[in-house]
Amino acid sequence: MTYTYLNVHEAASLIQHGETIGFSGFTPAGAVKAIPKALAQRAREHHERGEAFKVAVVTGASTGPSLDGELAKAEAVSWRTPYQSSKELRQSINEGKTRFFDMHLSTLSQSLRYGFLGKMNWAIVEACDLTDDGEIVLTTSVGAAPTFCRVADKILVELNRFHPPALRGLHDLYEPLDPPHRLPIPILKPSDRIGSATLKVDPRKIVGVVETSLPDETAGFAASDEVTDRIGENVAAFLAEELRQGRIPAEFLPLQSGVGNIANAVLGSLGREKAIPPFEMFTEVIQDSVLDLMRSGKVKFATGTSITVSSEALKSVYEDLDFFRPRLLLRPQEITNNPELVRRLGIITINTALEVDLFGNVNSTHVMGKNLMNGIGGSGDFTRNGYLSLFTCPSTAKGGKISTIVPVVSHMDHSEHSVQVVVTEQGVADLRGKSPTERAHLIVQNCVHPDYREELSGYFSKVRDGHTPHTLGAAYAMHQQFLQTGSMRGVSWEKYF
């Protein structure tokens, strides 16, 4: 079939107010970049004429500034799911201008197929190659692109010449059947291939192709520091001891790691820990540190749904595809995050918390209980089903003005029933088999910053009754103290008891 090649403005002109669009991308990796910017410009022109123009935006996870950022600045997003990390979009959501609903990333694709999110008008995906019979070779992520293309009425393709067609073979695309016809997912180890190397669509659905040559808008992560390095060392030491005690098999288990500078520091420490043998990864996002561990032989294989690395690291992958091809595999997020696979393969999960309370409940999404930061992402998919679930965070934030350990979290994403281990730069609290009172003592002793240890001990020492001992009147006193004074320090518990 001969496709219609369009410029970005021609492509954007096809999209109408009120339509729902599924954009490829999982983080800025593999996210479309040209059409969204043109669509934002179209929205501005409509708004200048006093005309409404907004679209619903669905992606795999977060995207880059050319997508979420540009559309949010143009006030062109009516609703958004399942995850975001854009400053502009976050502001629009917290101001109530954009409806956002947070979702576990493993559930997005099936919710679309089940019809829970309504009709999808467009799928707009980035490709590095496209054949006449409708075979699309994706770029640096998969996310939910296969399902977007399946359920959408029409498809636009950004054919991005920055990414080499030689990426063909780096993807393993598999969509499970829907109930009652769903079969077991036949993955027995992270490196098993079960699907197609290309995204196969009806070529008649592809109404336009836009050629580009644009790099991924990955900004990289902050360099590790003393705090993140210490967190990493604490995680590595804990897992090494679990190995020595026989609670982790001698050959180790596949690892999932969240995104960011703490995750990079943790992986770096695991790489240096001699007691931990070479291991595989079954995760969402493959970061720079994973590539380094592959080169050193510490990571034998990694499967995820995106390669989210610095431009230098991606260049090194493209220059050495023969090395990385047998060691890397990208899958849809409903496979990488699938709860049954996480449970059956025995994944060790390591994710980042915004705040943790004395009983092990975790907030990973909201600041002061109300303002969305990014979203739950895939942390719940892994935490609730992992062989061993760890949460990491620095013990303080905002230059020490906030304790990340609080009496009761201001918003709960992961309950005490799912969180097994809490790690800060201060130490490790192993919560397995512990009552709420025992958990509180462990967390205060091992994880709380010294500046807040007496304060949190003071709270807990005054609450003596109940299986989960706390008092509603004082549970958020530290949060209130911060809102009133700019610091959590100095709470006077006497007025509450």
Image: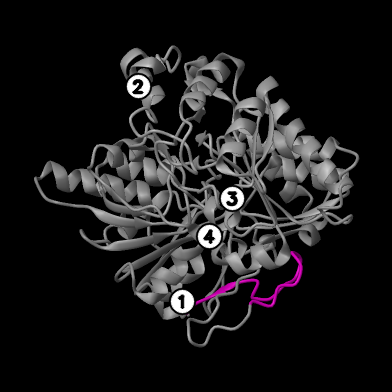
Viewer-side label of 1, 3: 3
Viewer-side label of 4, 2: 2
Viewer-side label of 3, 2: 2
Mark found first going from the N terminus, 4 or 2: 4
Q: Mark 2 packing: few (<14 Cα in 10 Å), some, or many (20+)?
A: some
Q: Which kind of residue does numbered mark 3 sit on?
A: Phe
Residue 43 vertical placement versus 171 (above, below): above
Q: Which kind of residue does numbered mark 4 sit on?
A: Gly
Tell me which residue sits at (34%, 17%) in the image.
495
**169 or 334: nearer the viewer:** 334
Mark found first going from the N terminus, 1 or 3: 1
Q: Which residues are magenta?
A: 185-201
Mark found first going from the N terminus, 2 or 1: 1
What is the number of the mark on residue 162? 3
Q: Which kind of residue does numbered mark 1 sit on?
A: Thr
Which residue carries the number 4 mark?
A: 143
What is the number of the mark on residue 2? 1
Residue 261 vertical placement versus 321 (above, below): above
What is the number of the mark on residue 496? 2
Tell me which residue sits at (60%, 20%) in the image.
449
Q: Which kind of residue does numbered mark 2 sit on?
A: Tyr
